[in-house]
Image (cartoon, coloured by chain):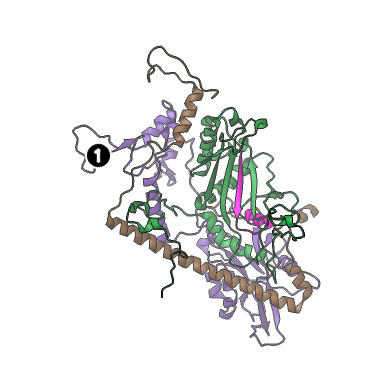
Chain colours: A green, B purple, C brown
Amino acid sequence: MVQPIHHTVKINKRLLSPNYPELKLAKHDIRNTAFKPAHTSQDRLQDHYTATLESDLLLINYTHNQQRQEGLKTREWDGSSPYHINRPVRPPRGRLVQTKDIKPRTWKNVPQLELIAINCFVKEAKAQSHLVIAAHLQLQQITNSKVQRVFTKSNVPQWGIRKGMPIGAKAEIFGADAHTFVTTLNELVLPRIRNFQGITNKSGDRSGNITFGLTPEDVKLFPELENNAEQWAKTFGIHITFRTTAQTDAEARILLSGLGFPFYGEEKN
Amino acid sequence: MIVSRTPIITQEIPEFDQQYQTYQSELEKRLMWTFPKFFYFKKGTLAERAFRKLQRYPSAPQPGVYFPHGKPDIKFDRDRRLKQDIVLRVPDEVKVNEAGETITTSEVDDETIAAFVPNSRTTEADRTNDVLSLERKLSRTLYLLVKDQSNTKGWAFPAFPLASKQPLHINAEVGIKTLGGPNMKLWTVSNTPCQLLKFSQGQLAVESAENVTREFMIKAHILAGDFEAPGVTHAWLTKEEIKEKCDGAYFEQVAHLLAEN
Amino acid sequence: MTGVNFQFTRGKRNKANRTRSPATERVLTQLKMISQRRKQPKLLQVCQEDHIRHETITTAFKLYRQEINANRAKLLLKQYESIKYAMEDLEQINSYLFHEANTNQKGKRFDLEMRIPTEYPPNQIWLHDYTPAEVAEKK
């Protein structure tokens, strides 16, 4: 007898139906409206990474006899009280959230830049909501990608915000776009910022993602805005997050220094 | 120690990649949003006039005129059925003047604006095939090889005897500075060795051999300065050239450490 | 919205008698930039023959890239194994050297002078007359 598998194998019914064939095309299919050409030019940052950085990072991060390091996990209540049964889960020791396990570093998990998330929060938009449009356009210009709008999530009368107000813009860039953004930052923007020390060593979310900020004045140095200065009398500060596949912040910083970012300050973790 | 000079210019693009990139970028031009001229050039300005002069505009549909390739669909000065090419500058024509110097058309038209002529990707060292120069093969990674004086190993990476109570990478740094002079800026990749070679009586040893000399390899990059060692025969070589010069068994042991580019 | 004026006009408002402040104009231009309206190209329509051509090119390039990436992964695996081999041997022969080679170098950074390669070389390709700072001070 054939065992029924209909409940174990997930079936995408949309693909089985003969209706709307144009909606079932793969993303890379040229007939799909979402088709985007890739590999339109040489990616020099990617070439640099594969030729030099990758094998160097493998050697730098190597530690002999590595074991899997357990992260902090949520704990069980000991059951000494009957009230423990329906209590919310007990947080990890000394923290509120769980941390990831650290796996041994091998040739399979050499740190890599995954994506860059750029976030622009416009405080003045509380009173002048049209400034959000300018912030949106600014991100579109410097990232060459589709930008998403950001709305406030909650009512905070003291800050003068209500739920659902447009308050900024954000963008996520991958691949060649992200690499162009990195080289523009390192070669054209950051070297011309006055008193720029670098990214602080204190930045990081403990799992290999590094964030730093640029002031409205710094943003004016992006060539897309600088060469069209009369349209950009007002610019907006941005937060840039590098999401990497590194397992710790220290490793992510080594990778970013390889991409050309300077760091300053004392490194703790 | 493996001292390498990382590439200074981008890799040579293989022909297939080049063709694929051209194809994809043409598709991109076809699928991109129309260039928003109104944002960059204010109407009635000199800049806008100059920009307009450079563009090639599609012909507009006329009543009573038959278009064999379909009626143009024009929005913002672009035929939406076709790709858009933005011309920002007339490409310079290279000419030779009476004195025999090469000049470009923009130099002829306007002396104040110097034409952008990039530096050549091939250098003097490439033409003379000067293996001692760090300015050769800019798109490749070069490695420092020295010829063994006793001539037992032949061409090999520089190696130094271990001084007592010194970590391997410090020993290698001191060793290379004593051999090649202090005027080199080196950056050691890591304190960890990347390969171990075992020698017995100057030859690569087999696994079971006894009384072996061990050679731990430390990686470093040269960032500035020159390797200056009058008494030592040395060369800066790419992976293929190392394969030609080195002993086959030796190359086999180190080949995977060398960059393809 | 502040900075965006609205003026009353006599009679019906039309393109000729409307007046907008420069601030309003700027916001409208910005909205026009963000919007895809009138900027979207026509949908790309390929005949079956062209589609097969495109698929062939894409597949060929994909296979070509796959081969390159597989070779790269193989090389990286070999590098990893050789590091492991060297460290295993070092652990057995000298505990001091092994400890020094296995400690995590805190604050390790790539040197900023290791630049990302550019399409054309810089005017000064290589800095030949380099003198280390300590030596220069002693002189």
Residue at position x 42%, y 35% in the image? B36
Q: Position of residue A93 (x, y in %)?
A: 75, 57
Above or below, comparing residue A237 to residue B142 in the picture: above
| Mark 1 Cα shell of 10 Å, populated few (<14), some (14-19), many (≥20) | some
Residue at position x 38%, y 46% in the image? B31
Q: Residue furthest front?
A: A82
Determine if the magenta segment contains residue C123: no
Left or right: A6, with C136 as reference point? left
Q: What chain letter is assigned to the residue under label 1?
A: B
Q: Amino acid at mark 1?
A: Lys
Q: Position of residue B117 (x, y in %)?
A: 48, 46
Helix, strand, or loop for circle 1?
loop
Quadrant into which the N terminus of chain B falls = bottom right
Q: How many marks?
A: 1
Left or right: C106, with B125 as reference point? right
Residue that carries the numbered disc 1 in the rendered image = B71
Residue at position x 51%, y 42% in the image? A147
In-front residue for pair B112/C40: C40
Q: Position of residue A45 (x, y in %)?
A: 54, 54
What segment is highlighted magenta in the picture?
A237-257
Evaluate whether residue B233 shows in this view. Answer: yes
Q: Position of residue B161 (x, y in %)?
A: 74, 75
Evaluate whether residue A92 shows in this view. Answer: no
Using the rendered view, name the quadrant where residue C115 is placed. bottom right
Above or below, comparing residue C7 to residue B208 in the picture: above
